[in-house]
Image (cartoon, helix red, strand yellow):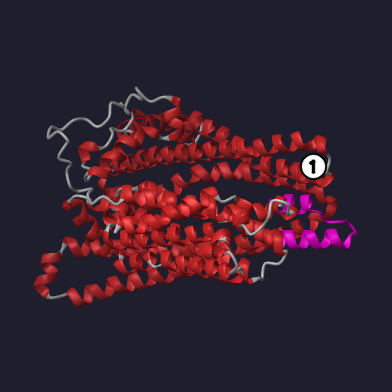
Amino acid sequence: MAFLISFPLNVICLWHFFVPLPYQCGKTMNSPSVLKSYILFDCMRQPFFGCAASLITIFLIVICSKRCSSIQEQKAKKAFQFFGMRRVRCVGMLPAISFLLTTWQGLRLIFSDHNEWMLHHSHTVLFICLHGLESVLSCWVLHYRYAAVMTKQRCLQIWWLLRPTFHIPYVYSLGRRYKVLWTPEVLEEVLDLLVSSLFGLSTFIIGFKVSSVISSKNRDLPDLSESLLDIKHSQIDLKSKKGISLWEQLLFTWVTPLMDLGIKRQLNYDDLFDLPESLDPNNCSKWLFKSWMEEQTDKECESSLFHAIYLVYRWQYLYIGIVKMLNDASGFAGPLLLHSIVTNMEDGQAQNAKIGYGCAIAIGLMSILRAFLGTQYTFMVAKLKLQLRSSIIMLIYYKALDVRLSDRNCFSNGEIQTLMSVDSERIVNLCGSLHELWSLPLQMMAALILLYLQVKFSFLAGLAVIVLLIPVNKVIATKIGLASQRMMKAKDERVRRMGEILTYIRTIKMYAWEGMLSNRVMESRKEEVKYLGVRKYLDALCVYFWATTPILFSFFTFGLYYLLGYELNAAIVRNLCS
């Protein structure tokens, strides 16, 4: 069978080798059109871009279609059943569609020049035969060797993904030849390119998803090659930060061993890193408790929890503020550099090319720097929130245990639980809000100065929109605060009633009071949900104004700038939108 297929192909290859290329293309050597680029692409399309690509595909299919082991095939079959075999078989029909398109193009070309077609179009016949063999093998390997191709052999998937690039030069040459895209020749090639691209992209995506399904199913299965002894997965001492370099802290690679272990099996409590000393709840509570006791012993001023927190975490908070300032400053660098690039492009001077390249490189570097600063700022704020939350909760717990019984009766269990869960969370959220309190005015001031340099006094129209929306946001914020207070009162009442029910559950069961008391709890719950709904609707309205404010600002600024008689260009528009 292989001999019957290879013999005519070898004959055509020999004929194609000995016959000069211009005669195969239907052109003589004296024809000046053979020197044109699109004729050369037309001549070289089947011999190189077509035949060579088909030969590479056939070679890779033969190498990569070896049968997997029975265990791997069974895993792949289960994964494909989870993903859907119909999709794989539908993708396997795409090479047949591409072969039909190629055959139609070749036959149309041959019958249009039927005189001496073997001399002129031997490369076309060779391309059709090779492409047909490639299509048959591709359909076969996707139907009967999908386990090997889709799970293990990545090189064939990558080649199928890159295969359509061989069509691009010929499509480009056709576009230059006909000057019009809506011609049958160009549409056929574009359709062939789309089919090949869809096939390559589909096989790559299916292979990636199937491999992820197989790996996710194997996470709970131990590897037979691993030792049965419990070996520590990392030599990193997170408690003392030994073995962690600065680069690992920037990229968070110190957590990679833990993630690799989580891929292999379910993580246990013993697998987790020990908390560093700065995040240890005992240390955090001791530091804050010591500062709070100093505040109470100081008779010159009134005790303040905020001042106690400030004394403990002031230097850490100042360091976070410096990172925040650098992050905000890097955010303004991108629009300014982009403005200079657009301005240089509008000038059209060759000597400004180096400035444009330098600005483009600077934009990339500033984006990387901002990504590093943003992630570090978020991580440090999260660490500070954990420290504050643990220390405040333990401080409330110590106070609840140490308070006198007469003072203890003034607070219900629900109110104490609310202090430990909700009120402590409000104090923790101040970590980010206080930085925004000074950061937002500085950002607005810098933005207004830059806008004045670009659009002069036209920015006042957008600023007027923002000023008019401030009272609206103030009213909404007041309503949100009122709804939150009423919701917390209803929540405290619900928690108090539930605590009483759980305390006297035997008496309630004895007298069959479950229905009556459950109705009381549901009344408190309905009131809580009602105010929660009011708060969420107001939050949605706040988000709406937050999202539409930049659009209204740009709209009114552009409008006033145009009415004042100035000319809008790409640099001003891009800088204003940024």
The percent position of residue 192, horizontal first and vertical second, equals: 52, 64
Q: Secondary structure at mark 1?
A: helix
Residue located at (20% from left, 37% from top): 270
Image side of residue 187 versus residue 145, left or right = right
Is the magenta region chiefly helix, strand or loop? helix
In magenta, the rendered stretch is 552-578
Q: Return the residue nearer the eye: 455 or 2.
A: 2
Q: Residue at x 69, y 47 (%)?
A: 444
Q: Nearer the viewer, residue 139 or 34?
A: 34
Q: Vertical placement of 325 versus 178: above or below?
A: above
Q: Is residue 554 magenta?
A: yes
| Residue 59 position (above or below residue 518) | above
Q: Position of residue 171 (x, y in %)?
A: 61, 59
In the figure, 61 relative to 482: above or below? above
Residue 379 magenta-highlighted: no
Q: Residues within 10 Å of mark 1 (few under 14, many from 20)?
A: some
Q: Residue furthest top?
A: 242
Left or right, 110 with respect to 1, comes to right
Count of marks overlaid on the render: 1
For the question of whether residue 468 can be seen, the reply is: no
Percent of width and height locating residue 556: 77, 62
81 or 121: nearer the viewer: 121
Mark yes or no: residue 142 visible: yes
Report which residue position mark 1 lands on. 344
Could you tell me the amino acid type at mark 1?
Asn
Which residue is painted at 54% across and 36% down in the image? 373
Question: Which residue is more in the foreground, 576 or 296?
Answer: 576
Image quarter hosting the N terminus: bottom left
